[in-house]
């Protein structure tokens, strides 16, 4: 099984949930240090950067937001399905759709503002980047036999994730607390859906449409 029920996953779910709740409290309680960071990052814009860095970060950020993330996730699911990883492909699409809906619901019920301007909370970009990183690490990485190539893949994905984190701070309607919330919320969603994967993947493997699928 590509995703296993490790004991550390439960602790990761607990810690990320506590961190997310604590962050919500800190934002709405206007904790001084967090407010300063939010005020500073809320004023950042890509236009403040040199042109080459502006275009580079915009290009990287495209693949973790809106149509870019949809394209990456669809391609991952398409190739996984084609290579007989039907259950991982189904899980990947289901996780993406449901978590995307949950993301917008949380953003709606937690109205965060800065300078009388609505801000994303959680931030969408880093949320999708975290999901995509996990999908690649869970389903693509283990199939690479070479340890060196597998390490290179993880390193490249980590660097891209860091670039998205930085680029997200320069987006309109985004501040530091929102980016941090996007990362924590992505971990919560992933751990919940990984638990469902471990529970129900063996059952799905016996059903029509998924019979013979690797998982």
Image (tube, grey):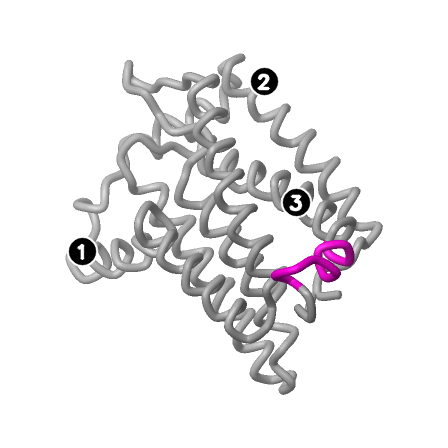
Q: Quarter holding the C terminus?
A: bottom right
Q: Left or right of 4: which side holds 46?
A: left
Seen from the viewer's position, the closer of residues 122 and 106 is 106
Dot 3 or dot 1: first in sequence order is 1
Label annotation for residue 124: none
Residue 60 percent across, percent down from the top left: 32, 59
Q: Residues within 10 Å of mark 3 (few under 14, many from 20)?
A: some
Which element type, helix, strand or loop, lies under badge 1? loop
Q: Which residue is mark 1?
A: 50
From the image, give the main secondary structure of the stretch colored magenta: loop
* 55 in the magenta segment: no
Task: Kindly report the distance in space between the C-alpha atoms of the residues bearing marks 2 and 3.
Answer: 25 Å
Q: Which residue is mark 2?
A: 25
Task: Kindly report the distance in space between the C-alpha atoms of the residues bearing marks 3 and 1.
Answer: 40 Å
Q: Which residue is mark 3?
A: 193
Task: Kindly report the distance in space between the C-alpha atoms of the residues bearing marks 1 and 2.
Answer: 36 Å
């Amino acid at each position: 099984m590509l995703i296993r029920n490790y004991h550390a996953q439960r602790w990761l779910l607990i810690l990320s949930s506590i961190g997310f709740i604590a962050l919500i409290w800190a934002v709405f309680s206007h904790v001084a240090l967090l407010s300063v960071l939010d005020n500073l990052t809320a004023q950042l814009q890509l236009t403040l950067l040199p042109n080459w860095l502006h275009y580079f970060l915009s290009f990287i950020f495209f693949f973790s937001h809106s149509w870019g993330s949809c394209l990456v996730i669809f391609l991952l699911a398409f190739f996984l399905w084609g290579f007989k990883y039907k259950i991982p492909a189904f899980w990947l699409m289901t996780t993406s759709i449901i978590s995307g809906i949950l993301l917008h619901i949380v953003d709606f019920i937690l109205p965060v503002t800065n300078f009388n301007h609505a801000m994303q909370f959680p931030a969408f970009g880093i949320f999708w980047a975290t999901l995509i990183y996990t999908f690649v690490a869970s389903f693509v990485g283990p199939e690479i036999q070479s340890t060196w190539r597998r390490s290179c893949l993880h390193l490249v994905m980590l660097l891209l994730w860091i670039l998205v984190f930085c680029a997200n701070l320069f987006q309109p309607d985004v501040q530091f607390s929102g980016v941090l919330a996007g990362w924590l919320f992505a971990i919560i969603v992933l751990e919940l859906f990984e638990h469902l994967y471990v529970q129900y993947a063996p059952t799905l493997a016996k059903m029509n449409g998924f019979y013979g699928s690797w998982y």
